Image: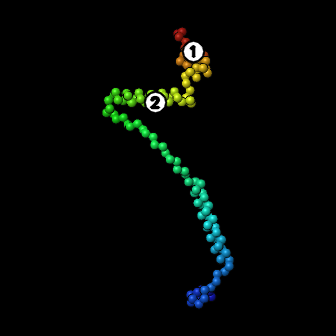
Amino acid sequence: MIRLILRLLNIRDYEGCKSCETLKQQLALVNEERERLTSTILNLVKPQVIPQQVTQTAPLVQSVSTFSRRRAELEKSERTKERIVKTSPLIAKVEDVKLSSGLDVNSVEELEKELGLEEKTNA
């Protein structure tokens, strides 16, 4: 109460207690540490910016185009798909399946015989 009256009358600036000063210092240290931790976490979580490669896409084919143009576009896309299949080492080829299984893949009758799924035409 005396401190309040002295402060109101501006007679003398009172000194703060040592425990209050210690608490203020500790609070400042904790706040500084919290800000450093927050910035570290944000730097860890921040996504990395990866530059994107610009890919050119084929323009959309208009529906009013002639049949020959649409056929040419379809043939072009089929050629690119075929080239990708031929050059890709990850796609199984028909020859690989024939060699590994020992059977002709196109022979449905042989597969049916092997699996016991022969149709009985005796009726």
Q: Residue at x 32, y 29 (%)?
A: 66
Q: Residues within 10 Å of mark 1 (few under 14, many from 20)?
A: some
Please identify the residue farthest to the top as the structure is shown.
122
Residue 117 visible in the current orientation: no
| Mark 1: amino acid | Glu
Count all numbered tags in the image, as a single digit: 2
- Name the residue: 34% across, 35% down: 62
Q: Are the residues flagged by discs 1 and 2 in contact, CB closer than 8 Å?
A: no
Circle on res. 80 = 2
Badge 2 crowding class, 10 Å Cα cut-off, few under 14, some 14 to 19, many 20 or more, is: few
Q: Secondary structure at mark 2?
A: helix
88 or 123, nearer to the observer: 88
Of the residues under marks 1 and 2, which one precedes in the sequence?
2
Tell me the CA gap for discs 1 and 2: 34 Å
The color scheme shown is rainbow
Left or right, 12 with respect to 74, comes to right
- Residue at 43% across, 30% down: 77
Q: Nearer the viewer, residue 121 or 21?
A: 21
The amino acid beneath tag 2 is Thr
Q: Nearer the viewer, residue 112 or 123?
A: 112
**Label placed on residue 54:** none
- Look at 31% across and 33% down and name the residue there: 64
Q: SS at mark 1?
A: helix
On the image, the x and y values in percent for residue 6 come to 60, 88
Mark in front: 1 vs 2? 2
Left or right, 70 with reference to 44? left
Point out residue 98 in the picture as x, y percentages from the top left corner.
58, 20
In the rendered structure, find residue 110 and report the number of the disc placed on it. 1
Q: Quadrant of residue 113?
A: top right
